[in-house]
Image (cartoon, grey):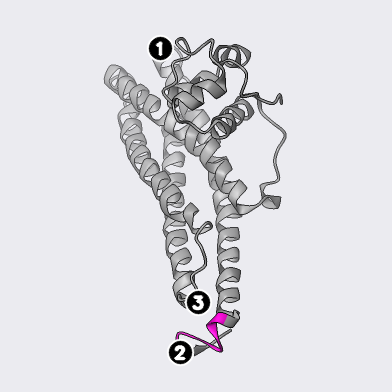
Amino acid sequence: MCTISPLATVGALVTEQPSRSLVFEELDVDICVNGQKSLADVCAAMSLAVGGVIALLTAEDARRKGSQPVNWGSREVEEVASHVVATHHAYLRRALPRLSMLTSRVARGHGQEFPEVAELSMVFETFRAEAERHMCQEEGILFSITSKVDNVDRSLDERLAETVGPLANMTIEHDDAARALTRMHMLTKGYWVPEGACNGYRSMIDGLAELDRDMKQHLHIENHILFPRIMDRERSRAISVARSPQRGASVSGRTAI
């Protein structure tokens, strides 16, 4: 995959890979007005971190073109968390509003012909609301856990409670999301397009199938790689702090582990 240069113009970047326009749209960068400007200049004018924008563009390239599988289990926790945000969260923030429009439009226009689309629209809207809240919680609470400065005044139990609670809630919500995906898969008969369906129906099915594929990767990385590694690292950090000389021989009145 080619390296994106901050000196490349916005227009050249989009010409090279049209799907990059989705990233610029999300960042409110007008690709027409800024087409002849370098990425670096546009980022400076809009107070955007050029490195972060390049990461988003690179993630979009990888999603669209298909890159070699990455062994996320061998990467640092911060890198895995950044990948989830830049790739999967960014995708959801683009896709969910569009799919809301498509599912509601199909339900209104073809509800009598395809009765299942009414339920499909309702299931999707619940999924969207929960996914958007869940992403904010992850980014604002869970992912920030790994960057907190160790506080030697907290007990081992207090430190672990900060991690165990959010992780347990996130995992339950992942199960709810998986059930919603299963229901949508069933209602669409495996994302099948019926004969005579309009282009709007086809677009909806294509978008839902892509959502299903992305969410399965998303949930796999978080459930089987990111969350367990955050838990293991925070447990190790807590024990290390409990044993540190500054803590002395006890932690909150108990003998240090």
Q: Are marks 3 and 1 in contact (CB under 8 Å)?
A: no
Of labels 3 and 1, earlier in sequence is: 3
**Could you tell me residue 196's position as x and y percent?**
43, 11
Question: What is the span of residues highlighted in magenta in the rendered image?
Answer: 246-253
Residue 123 placement, left or right of 247: left
Of labels 2 and 1, earlier in sequence is: 1
Tag shown at residue 198: 1
Residue under label 3, please give it: 156
Mark 1: few, some, or many residues within 10 Å (few <14, many ≥20)? Answer: few
The C terminus lies in quadrant: bottom right
Marks 2 and 1 sit apart, C-alpha to C-alpha, by 69 Å
Residue 35 placement, left or right of 106: right
The N terminus lies in quadrant: top right
The answer to which of 53 and 169 lies nearer the viewer is 53
Single out the mark in the foreground, 3 or 1. Answer: 3
Q: Quadrant of residue 135?
A: top left
Single out the mark in the foreground, 2 or 1. Answer: 2
Three-letter residue code for mark 2: Gly
Three-letter residue code for mark 3: Leu
Marks 3 and 1 sit apart, C-alpha to C-alpha, by 59 Å
Residue under label 2, please give it: 253
